[in-house]
Amino acid sequence: MKLFDTQLPAAFSKTLYEEKCADLAAEHTDKIFDVAFTGTANLLNNAKSMDKPCAFKFVNVTGGFIVGCIVQYFANSDDSNPGNWNMVWTFDEKDIDEDKMLVLDINQPQTHSYFRAYSGNKYGMVFQYEGSLEITTGCAFEQLKKWLDENAKEGEEVTIECDGVFQARVAVENGEKVFALEADGEIKNLIKDDAAIEK
């Protein structure tokens, strides 16, 4: 199901206005997701290391986990061929191990330039007020997870997608809801798929 064929954009705009005191029309929902996914990929592409996985978390104002992305290098057993980088999104905080990963999050101001630069260059969109980037992107992911949770069906995989940005899925397995999220289109290529890089 396409993003704008669902009620998610309306729910995002309404929640943002009523609970976060921010005003953004539903028609801009895809732009916020694009900024969030592309900014994360650009940030992790710069921060990644072959030595250990690197993760980025979207958290709320109190630090509560919303969603995260992990980039990890997998070496090739054949030394003549380069290894590759893998980017995985997760709704499960347990997937991010702060003892074994370099972990960054949206509440750290040094991460914001990746999102602000992309939003300004592509959309002419500015996160003007302190906290507006964190609140807006966090709310988008919270509403995405809520939509998946509310639309999960036994025996059926329910999908929502924003072309060129993301695809999210939920299925009910043995009575438990299983969520999946992945970047789409060129965003996946922002994390190099080979080792022909400096770090």
Image (tube, grey):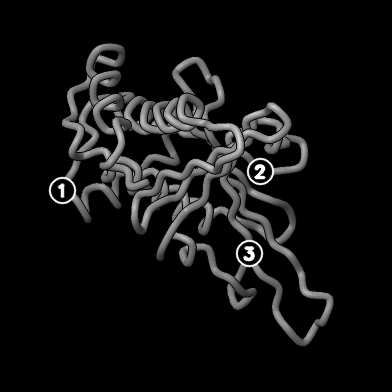
Mark 3 residue type: Trp
* Numbered badge on residue 124: 1
Q: CA distance from mark 3 to mark 1?
A: 31 Å
- Check disc 1 and report its element: helix, strand or loop: loop
Looking at the rendered image, the disc whose residue lies closer to the viewer, 2 or 3, is: 3
| Image quarter in which the C terminus is found | bottom right
- Quadrant assignment, res 185: bottom left
Residue for point 29% across, 30% down: 7
Q: Is residue 82 left or right of residue 130?
A: right
Q: Where does residue 186 sit, x and y in percent of width and height?
A: 40, 65
Q: Where does residue 18 sit, x and y in percent of width and height?
A: 25, 12
Residue for point 21% across, 49% down: 120
Circles 3 and 1, Cβ within 8 Å, touching? The answer is no
Q: Is residue 99 left or right of residue 161?
A: right
Looking at the rendered image, the disc whose residue lies closer to the viewer, 1 or 2, is: 1
Graded by Cα atoms within 10 Å as few (under 14), some (14 to 19) or many (20 or more), the crowding at tag 3 reads: many
Q: Which residue is mark 3?
A: 85
Circles 1 and 2, Cβ within 8 Å, touching? The answer is no
Mark 1 residue type: Gly
Q: Nearer the viewer, residue 62 or 171?
A: 171
Q: Is residue 120 above or below residue 192?
A: above
Mark 2 residue type: Leu
* Numbered badge on residue 102: 2
**Outermost right residue:** 77
